[in-house]
Image (tube, coloured by chain):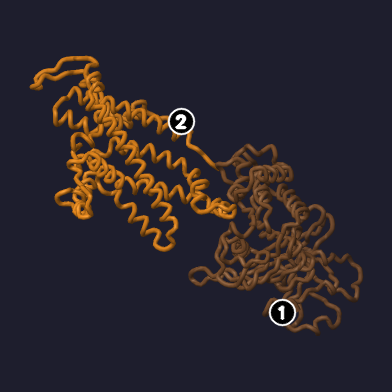
Chain colours: A brown, B orange
Amino acid sequence: MAKIELKDVRKVYAGNVEAVKGVSLSVEDGAFVVLVGPSGCGKSTLLRMVAGLESISSGTVQIGDRVVNDLEPAERDIAMVFQNYALYPHMTVRKNLEYGLKNRKMAPAEIARRVDEAAKMLEIGALLDRRPGQLSGGQRQRVAMGRALVREPAAFLFDEPLSNLDAKLRVQMRAEIRRLQRRLRTTSLYVTHDQLEAMTLADTLVVLNAGRIEQAGSPMEVYERPASLFVATFIGSPAMNLLPLGEQGIPGLTAPEGLFSRTRPAETLGIRPEHMRVVDGEAPRPEEMRFDLTVSGVEVVGAESFVYGTLPKGGSEIAVRVPGYSHAEPGTPLTAAADTSYLHRFDRETGRRI
Amino acid sequence: MQKAVFPNKLLPYLLLAPQVAITLVFFYWPASQALYQSMLKEDPFGLKSKFVGLQNFAQVLGNPDYLNSVRVTVVFSVSTAVLAMALALFLATAAEKVVRGKGFYRTMLIWPYAVAPAVAGLLWLFMFNPSMGTFAYLLRDAGYRWNPLLDGDQAMLLVVVAAAWKQISYNFLFFVAALQSVPRSLIEAAAIDGASSTKRFWTIVFPLIAPTTFFLLVVNTVYAFFDTFGIIDAVTGGGPAQATQTLVYKVYNDGFVNLDLGGSAAQSVILMAIVIALTAIQFRYVEKRVHYA
């Protein structure tokens, strides 16, 4: 068990391409931190730098009380689960699990104990004598986890471990990873591009964009108070509705007296689809904004529907969550309302929250 | 697969005819001639020949010279194959590590394959000929008694090195491709699992490229058996005292130099059997190709 501490970590590739532009982050002992971001944001590079698979251009990485910048991956006391599992295809599952322990010259009795324990924990006992080629995707995933588990390392590093699984298995393995981590309390750093995975797994969610941390915080903190336009649109599905505020306010939007007088024109307003409702003839409440929309489409998810409408004069498209099944017809007018207390406000120049 | 149907019954046979004709003229005819010849005995003046059955075979197999040639061939082939493969694998792993100019190094390493065997032999002969070779001169200066014209072991060493040198490029190409097909993440996983780079190579990379290694072993053995005539002829001519006379070289020497046509034919029939056996192994292997995935 150990704390992972990154201080102003940078990665510059040949040709002066900066993939990671100064990331400082501290992962508390036993915490589950998820790095999330779009492809190319530097999240995998960052993880590989912690693992020692990628050199660190500047800054320091500390695991426990050691600065590990110049240590080999093997000396960092970490275990990693790879996206493609990276199981050794010519070895049985048991040999795969034993490999890292044998390399460390561990006593055979201890190796056997750890392998049995991991096999029991992951329910792969029956697979120990098979080869990876004979396993299903989900089973391989478990073996990959097992290989990390038997090491009993100071920290687990996960590089998009679920992205090769089908949707159902992914949800199942997600819950299982969470449960294992809670039980073992091993410091974990987890990289994903899937915001749902990030939200459900993380103690601390770190949103990365273009090599920088956009925001770090608990998942609900990030969801409820996105620090920037990028985070606001990246976390949440469908994405937060954005309304660029012009000199004349926003056509089609009626807001309570004085709402916009406090704002500067170069602002973008944001509101999440679930904070909006469809108005069915009732009178407006004083703290409410009203949107005059033309329905452009409906997505029925099952338990809920999303009605999409556009504001007049080529305004933004707005998504409104409707419980159950929506019968809105494309092309018909629709009035939606939202409480102003749910409004997010961003500086359009810097993209930061106001 | 869909069955192609030709409108004319004759057409498919006509289309096949050239290929069949070439095979008949250049393979079956000479092969059957050799088979027939191997059971004949010529009189000393080559005026007439008589049928002797398997007597030529008995003579060949009972001849200590022939058994010596078998031993020479085995030593030569195994040494050449092992040397060519080991060096090629070493070069391929080294080329993997090159960051800049990868393409340049690879191209340079592949070039020797374009050199004809006899020319390759001549190159090595010039370098190591005891009377005019540069390296022979250096070796003698260093106090080493270098004379492949008299010392059979040295002659063997020279032809093995020359033959291996020529085959390294070919092996190198295959090994480079095989090394590239080993997923990087496996090597990274092994690095995290605490394996040193030497250990990673022998426990992860080497087993994973085993199919290529086996394929090359077969190809190299066949090469050393049959395609090295030019090198041996140019460098040692089979000598000294038959120390480098491989089976193929002996066929040529007995048949075309010593004019023992029957005995030479019997030897080539034995060689044919060896080729067939080797090919069978190769096909069997190709069909049951090891798949790791």
Give residue B242's quadrant in the image.
Answer: top left
Give residue B148's quadrant in the image.
Answer: top left
- Label 2 environment density (alpha carbons within 10 Å; few <14, some 14–19, many ≥20): few
- Residue A249, image x, y percentages: 76, 80
Q: Secondary structure at mark 2?
A: loop
Vertical position of residue A24 compared to residue B239: above or below: below
Whether residue A267 is visible to the viewer of this picture, yes or no, is: yes
Residue found at the far front of this picture: B143
Which residue is the site of mark 1? A347
Which residue is the site of mark 2? B3
Decide if residue A341 is on the left or right side of residue B274: right
Give residue A241's quadrant in the image.
Answer: bottom right
* Residue in view at x 83 percent, y 60 percent: A322
Q: Amino acid at mark 2?
A: Lys
Foreground pick, B98 / B141: B141
* Residue in view at x 41 percent, y 39 percent: B215
Decide if residue A7 is on the left or right side of residue B213: right
Foreground pick, B51 / A297: B51
Distance between mark 1 and mark 2 Cα atoms: 69 Å
Q: Secondary structure at mark 1?
A: strand
Q: Nearer the viewer, mark 1 or mark 2?
A: 1
Decide if residue A97 is on the left or right side of residue B46: right
Vertical position of residue B1 compared to residue A144: above or below: above
- Label 1 environment density (alpha carbons within 10 Å; few <14, some 14–19, many ≥20): some
**Badge 1: chain ID:** A
Q: Amino acid at mark 1?
A: Asp
- Residue B179, image x, y percentages: 46, 49
Q: Are marks 1 and 2 in contact (CB under 8 Å)?
A: no
Q: Quadrant of the C terminus of chain B?
A: top right
